Image (cartoon, helix red, strand yellow):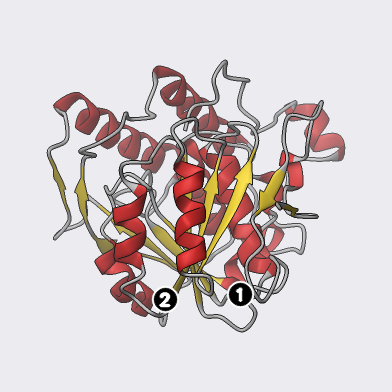
Amino acid sequence: MVGTVEGMVGKDAPTANTTVASKRPRPGGDLTETGRGRSSLVVIPTYNEVQNLPHLLERVMEHDEFEVLVIDDSSPDGTGEVADRFAEQFSDRISVLHRTAKLGLGSAIATGLRYALRHEYRFVFHMDADLSHDPSVLPPMLRVLERADIVVGSRYLAGGTTVRRARHREFLSRLASKYARAVLGLPLSDPTGGYRGYRRQVLEALDLDQVASRGYAVQIELNHRCHQAGFRIEEFPIRFHERDAGRSKMTLGIVFEALFVVAALRLTGTTADEARQPAGLRRPTGSSAGQQGLSIRPPELKDSPR
């Protein structure tokens, strides 16, 4: 039996019966009860990571202070079934959210952050499922949140590094970082990195329904929103290891999306006071919206790749 998760999808709500979020029930409680009073959640979006996810979950489970939410977009290779088996084995620490369509990385991360709020976690992290991010640095990154609002794992900070990465991908990554820093004024060496953690108060202050990026540009967008709201962001050097198994989700469409999102975010900037209002960072309304005619929602992509 699979239970439906009510109110979890936000702007990912079903359209023409194509999107449903669900979770396999666990002994002793349903999805609405897990996480109460817990400290730290790690959100792991997945799509076709059946070779990498088991080892990743085993390594995260070595750290008792962390729980996991796997968000699987109906991976055809059986990743969701593997996640379910781990959820049965670690019934008090691993939850699985199944979605019946491939909605993209940005949607998965926003859904995971809303989940953390609903279930009262104090800290929430998200990381890639391809073993490029090392779970052993979760505890030191958590300690950074004792003094900062957001911690961002950085490949390009002193002490950080990348391993076995193709030259063209390294070039694109560094170019995207420079572009985001120059256009948005982000005080980060690696604004495109996907390994990070937040205090709960940060997520409460932002309107996660306004997160528009569908691909990897979500990393830049979240950094921008947090920076605009005046939160303290601290980087932590990490070792980024290029995947050994599976296929990269990076495509030319994702690059174009990032270019569009960064430009749109620059034009729809707001003040720190406005960003910290209950509605979070919002699109322009009223006369300002009419004058600018802007939206940070990127153009539709044919495959919404992750």
Q: Position of residue 251 (x, y in %)?
A: 39, 21
Inspect the image, locate mark 1, and give the three-letter code of the amino acid beneath it.
Answer: Gly
Q: Which mark is residue 35?
A: 1
**Which element is circle 2 on?**
loop
On screen, residue 262 versus residue 5, left or right, reads left
Is 100 or 11 nearer to us in this picture? Answer: 100
Image mark count: 2
Residue 238 visible at all? yes
Q: Which residue is mark 2?
A: 145
Residue drawn 23% across the image and 50% down it: 155
Q: Position of residue 260 (x, y in %)?
A: 53, 26
User: Residue 205 sits in which quadrant?
Assistant: bottom right
Residue drawn 60% across the image and 41% down it: 107
Image vertical order of residue 209 relative to residue 172, above or below: below
Q: Position of residue 175 (x, y in %)?
A: 28, 31
Q: Decide which of tag 1 and tag 2 comes sooner along the chain.
A: 1
Residue 68 visible at all? no
Find the distance from the CA under tag 1 to the CA under tag 2: 19 Å
Image vertical order of residue 256 relative to residue 236, above or below: above
User: Residue 38 sits in which quadrant?
Assistant: bottom right
Inspect the image, locate mark 2, and give the three-letter code of the amino acid beneath it.
Answer: Leu
Q: Position of residue 233 (x, y in %)?
A: 42, 64
User: Residue 239 sits in which quadrant?
Assistant: bottom left
Residue drawn 38% across the image and 75% down it: 142
**Which element is circle 1 on?**
loop
Q: Rate crowding at label 1 as few (under 14), some (14 to 19) or many (20 or more) other CA atoms within 10 Å.
A: many
Is 34 or 162 nearer to us in this picture? Answer: 34
On screen, residue 29 versus residue 186, left or right, reads right
